[in-house]
């Protein structure tokens, strides 16, 4: 079987870049895979095993392939994928059911309101188009999460792979007959790192309480809520530190937020880091805060990686995160008590190392049992057998070449 695979890859700063670089070697044991990117050279050594094309060449190459897989997310890195899949239907891996932010970036953010109007008309009829016109002229405001604008992608897909029941149900509400398959997100179980060596490399004292948030930093990650809770915690732990590891959304002035809270001396903005630095921060961290509300339905690779590393993680009790088993993480309600709960959970975990170890151990076992790369690859193979019958061999065509760690793990 010959597969065309569309995804952002490193150096594009996206969790899906890391996701694909881990998954592709497992799929390559069963088929020949060409990868299509948007006009850059991938930087991960993993990708030297694959033929990588500029996506602009795909129309002249499309007839070569038995199947196409599109990794679809809600960021500008997926604009070329969105355009291609509408013309050449294939299997869409829908990482989140909300695509409004991507559509906005592709259209009126770039001076072309027609696409935006067309999408609202397609999804919500004439009333939707009228609303879009008011939005464009600043006469109305909406929560993007209430208008997913994913109908066209869902309708065009030959098959849809999702990573949560939450997104599966969202897809079926829009298209009750949608060919949708739930497949676990696969995570490479990390080797335990030396905590004190990691702290030494990062310049952290051995006994410092370190709280961390990992992944792309934006307002929906509830960073302000977390930092305000941390500020209240500090009188009890005056040497405590907070680190934010990941790229920051262009329109989110998190540095000014830190300054306004008077936390410049104890909050570090690490930015998007390489794999070794990411692993050091994970090994050095005591408590992770990875909240998300509202949610686009995404399954967070960052959260699963932190759980796989055996860390206690605070998550929002919403969307795909609510599907994580109790006892493997700490779930924070998204109601009016959110801030108080974050503070109390931080206080509880900070004062009880045994509890941190117990939750972290449960988390690691859960990921090891339910989110392996073997399980993820099998889900893809099942989908290809279902939607492209007779194209996939019954046994591997080459030995499995397991990927090394991606260049960066901050998605």
Image (tube, helix red, strand yellow):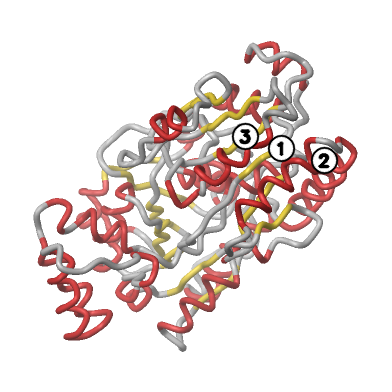
Disc 1: which residue: 287
Q: Are marks 2 and 3 in contact (CB under 8 Å)?
A: no
Q: Residues within 10 Å of mark 2 (few under 14, many from 20)?
A: many
Q: Nearer the viewer, residue 290 or 209?
A: 209
Q: Are marks 1 and 3 in contact (CB under 8 Å)?
A: yes
Asked if residue 182 is positioned above or below residue 373 in the image, the reply reads: below
- Kindly tell me whether residue 40 is visible in this rendering: yes
Q: Residues within 10 Å of mark 1 (few under 14, many from 20)?
A: many
Q: Position of residue 332 (x, y in %)?
A: 66, 57
User: Are circles 1 and 2 on residues that touch, CB within 8 Å?
Assistant: yes
- Element marked by disc 2: helix
- Circle 1: element type: strand
> Could you tell me which residue is drawn at 46 percent across and 52 percent down?
220
Rendered location of residue 136, percent (x, y): 14, 64
Frontmost residue, 192 versus 45 = 192
- Write down the quadrant of residue 3 in the picture: bottom left
User: Where does label 2 land, which residue?
Assistant: 356
The tag earlier along the polypeptide, 1 or 3, is: 3
| Residue 130, quarter of the rendered image | bottom left
Task: Determine the CA span between mark 1 and mark 2.
Answer: 8 Å
Label 3 packing within 10 angstroms: few (<14), some (14-19), many (20+):
many
Extreme residue in the bottom direction: 176
> Who comes first in sequence, dot 1 or dot 2?
1
Q: Eyeballing the image, is 244 above or below 52? A: above
Q: Which residue is mark 3?
A: 212
């Amino acid at each position: 079987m010959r597969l065309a695979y569309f995804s952002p890859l490193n150096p594009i700063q996206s969790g899906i870049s890391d996701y694909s670089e881990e998954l592709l070697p497992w799929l390559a044991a069963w088929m020949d895979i060409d990868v299509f990117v948007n006009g850059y050279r991938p930087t991960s050594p993993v990708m030297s095993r694959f033929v990588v094309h500029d996506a602009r060449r795909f129309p002249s190459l499309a007839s070569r392939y038995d199947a196409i897989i599109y990794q679809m997310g809600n960021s500008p890195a997926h604009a070329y994928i969105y355009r291609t899949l509408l013309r050449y239907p294939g299997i869409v891996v829908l990482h989140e059911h909300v695509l409004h932010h991507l559509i906005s970036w592709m259209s009126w953010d770039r001076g072309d309101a027609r696409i935006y109007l067309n999408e609202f008309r397609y999804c919500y009829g004439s009333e939707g188009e009228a609303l879009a016109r008011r939005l464009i002229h600043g006469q109305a405001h909406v929560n993007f999460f209430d208008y997913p604008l994913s109908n066209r992608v869902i309708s065009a897909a030959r098959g849809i792979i999702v990573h949560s029941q939450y997104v599966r149900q969202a897809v079926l509400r829009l298209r009750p007959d949608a060919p949708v398959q739930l497949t676990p997100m696969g995570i490479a179980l990390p080797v335990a790192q030396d905590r004190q060596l990691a702290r030494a490399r990062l310049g952290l004292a051995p006994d410092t309480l370190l709280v961390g948030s990992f992944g792309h930093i934006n307002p929906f990650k509830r960073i302000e809520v977390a930092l305000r809770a941390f500020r209240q915690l500090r009188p009890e732990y005056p040497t405590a530190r907070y680190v934010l590891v990941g790229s920051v959304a262009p329109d989110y002035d998190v540095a000014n937020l830190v300054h306004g809270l008077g936390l410049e001396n104890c909050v570090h903005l690490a930015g998007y880091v390489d794999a070794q630095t990411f692993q050091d921060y994970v090994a050095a961290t005591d408590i992770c805060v990875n909240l998300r509300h509202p949610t686009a339905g995404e399954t967070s690779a960052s959260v699963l990686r932190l759980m796989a590393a055996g860390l206690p993680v605070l998550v929002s009790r919403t969307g795909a995160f609510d599907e994580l088993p109790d006892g493997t993480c700490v779930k924070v309600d998204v109601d009016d008590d959110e801030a108080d709960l974050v503070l109390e959970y931080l206080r509880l975990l900070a004062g009880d190392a045994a509890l941190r170890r117990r939750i972290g151990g449960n988390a690691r076992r859960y990921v090891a049992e339910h989110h392996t790369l073997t399980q993820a690859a099998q889900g893809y193979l099942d989908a290809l057998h279902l939607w492209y019958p007779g194209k996939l061999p019954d046994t591997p065509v080459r030995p499995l070449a397991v990927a090394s760690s991606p260049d960066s793990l901050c998605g």
